[in-house]
Every structure is written in C-alpha cells, then in structure tokens.
Amino acid sequence: MSIPAAYVGLILIWSTTPLAIKWSGEGVGFLFGATARMALGALACLLLLRLLRIALPWDSNARRGYAAGALGIFGAMLCTYWGAQRIPSGLVSVLFGTSPLLTGILASLLLGERAFSPMRVVGMALGMVGLLAIFRDSIALGDQAGVGIGAVLGGAFLHALSGVLVKRSNAQIHPMALNTGALLLAVCFYLPTWGISDGQLPQHAEPRTWLAIGYLALLGTAVGFNLYFYALRHLSAGTMSLIPLLTPVLALLIGMGLNGEQPGWAIWAGSAAILLGLTLHQFGERLLPRLRPG
C-alpha cells in the first residue's frame, strides 16, 4: 500500500468517526450502536488474523495487554458514545484530541517519562484554556451539553490511560493480535451491559444508522487500526503526531456540512487554543531553539 494513501486514509477515517458515532445511535440507542460496532469489528479482525495467519496468544502476558487495551475500547468508547449524543460531532473530535496531553501526564506518572518541560506545560495550559472556553459555550448548546463534554473528556482520559497501560504491560505480541484480543474482551463487557440496559433489537432504524455501524465496524475498527500501525512503521513519530492536529478541524467541517452543526465562536476559539496547545506540546521543544536569536 502507498504510505501517503495510508496516512490520508487514516486521517479521513478518524475525522469521520465522531459523526458516524453520533449517527450509529440514532433510533437504536448508543449502547446498541457501540455493541454492534465492536462485535462486528471483532469478527472482522478475527477473519483478518486467520487470513494473515497471525496467532492470537492467551498467556498471562498477552491477557494483561488485552485487558489494558479493553479499558480503552470499552470504557473510553462507552463514555464517548454516551457523550456524543449530547454535543456536536465536531466537538467530540476536538475534546478527544486532548488525549495526547493526558497521555503525557499519565506517562510521566506511571512510566517515569519526561512530560513537564516548559513548552509542554505551556501547551497543557493552553489546552485547559481551550476547554474552559468550550465549557463556557456549552450553555448555548443545551442543558445536556455540559455532561456530554465531561463524558467525552472522561473517554479521552480512559483512552490515554489504556495506551499507557498497554505500553507498561509490555505484551510482546503482534499489534493486530493485541487489537483483536482487546476487542474480544471488550465485547464480553459490551454484551451484558447492553442486555441489562435494554437488550431489545431495534425495529425501526434509519438506513444511515446501519451504514454508520457498518462503517465504524469495518473501517473505524478493523481497517483504521491496521492503517495506523502500517503508517507508524513507515513514518516518523513527528509526522504521526500531526494527525490529532488535523482531524478535529476536519471533523468540525464535516459536522457542519453533513449534519448541519453550527459551532459558536467560543467552540472555534477553544478548539484553536487546544490545537495550539497540542502543537506546543508535541513540537515546542524543537521549535524553541529556532526562535532564539543568534
């Protein structure tokens, strides 16, 4: 596969995922949408493992990795799906884009990595300013917007924690096997959660709801993950870290064009502050020497 094509495909998938999440819960409930996506995604990943002859180990080391990954697939996605029903889809991408900032903090606490350089602290502070601006605008979005924003931020935190715990588990298995094992474990939690909460198969759902679930299962879950690791293998970390800077802007525009969303000025200003904070957090230490005179 062409490396630029994989990179662009990954950006497009991640930019359209928030709107697909929103649509996948229409008329069927967010829990059914999330459960159906993960179950179908797990089946697709199992098929890929079989076709590519990749083993799916279940030793204690692998199980630790699966459990850490399932925290993000179940916990983070459950929060995100719930919150996405209450706020614009573009805002979901902006809020979830704070996960690199949260990952830096958690990696410092749990892995001993260096995360609090001056430029990174400035980046985190700008991110907080952006979040405060967005919370300020949540009043205009409706009564449920505040809790929706909080839920998506909780999902971003669990996603970051999951990534750090996966790294700390040091599971020496193929990335596709890690994703599949984590998906299978997460489905074991999704099914009873959906069964207890509702358990009813939807009778009247719009065609775009089913299309969104299928899109998320095949492209968002199976293809998107594989594109990520393919691109990660062939591109620098700096190039990959541009993705969280690009996807929120595209997601905001996609939500406006396809879902009639109209973000207020505070959301645009808050988004700009968060993206600038991410830029400083990711690239500030390399940019600072170039800005110094002499």
Image (cartoon, rainbow, N blue to C red):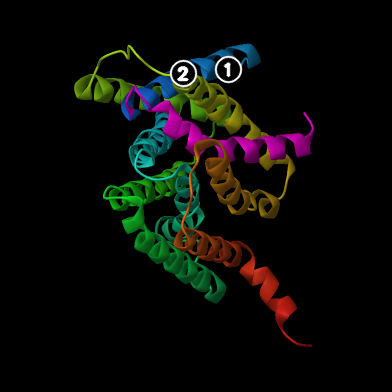
Give residue 49's mark.
1
- How many residues crowd mark 1 within 10 Å: few (<14), some (14–19), many (20+)? some
Q: Where is residue 248 in the image (x, y as percent from the top left)?
A: 55, 49
Seen from this angle, which residue lies furthest left?
196
- How many residues crowd mark 2 within 10 Å: few (<14), some (14–19), many (20+)? some
27 in magenta:
yes
Q: Which residue is drawn at 46% across and 49% down?
A: 91
Quarter containing the N terminus: top right
Q: Which amino acid does label 2 sit on?
A: Trp
Magenta extent:
1-29
Q: Where is residue 225 in the image (x, y as percent from the top left)?
A: 57, 32
**Res 35 seen here:** yes
Q: Position of residue 21 (x, y in %)?
A: 45, 33
- Foreground mark, 2 or 1? 2
Earlier in the chain: of badge 2 and badge 1, it is 1
Q: Which amino acid does label 1 sit on?
A: Leu
Which secondary structure is most common in the magenta stretch?
helix
Tell whether label 1 touches label 2 (CB within 8 Å): no
Q: Mark 2 points at which residue?
A: 210
Q: Where is residue 22 in the image (x, y as percent from the top left)?
A: 43, 34
Q: How far apart are marks 2 and 1 (CA)?
A: 25 Å
**Left of 4 or right of it: where is 136?**
left
Determine the secondary structure under disc 1: helix
Q: Which residue is drawn at 55% across and 36% down?
A: 258
Image position of 45 with respect to 174: above or below: above
Q: Residue at x 54, y 34 (%)?
A: 172
The answer to which of 69 and 62 lies nearer the viewer is 69
**Left of 203 or right of it: where is 209?**
right
Image position of 279 with respect to 144: above or below: below
Image position of 206 with respect to 268: above or below: above
Image quadrant where residue 131 sits? bottom left
Quarter containing the C terminus: bottom right
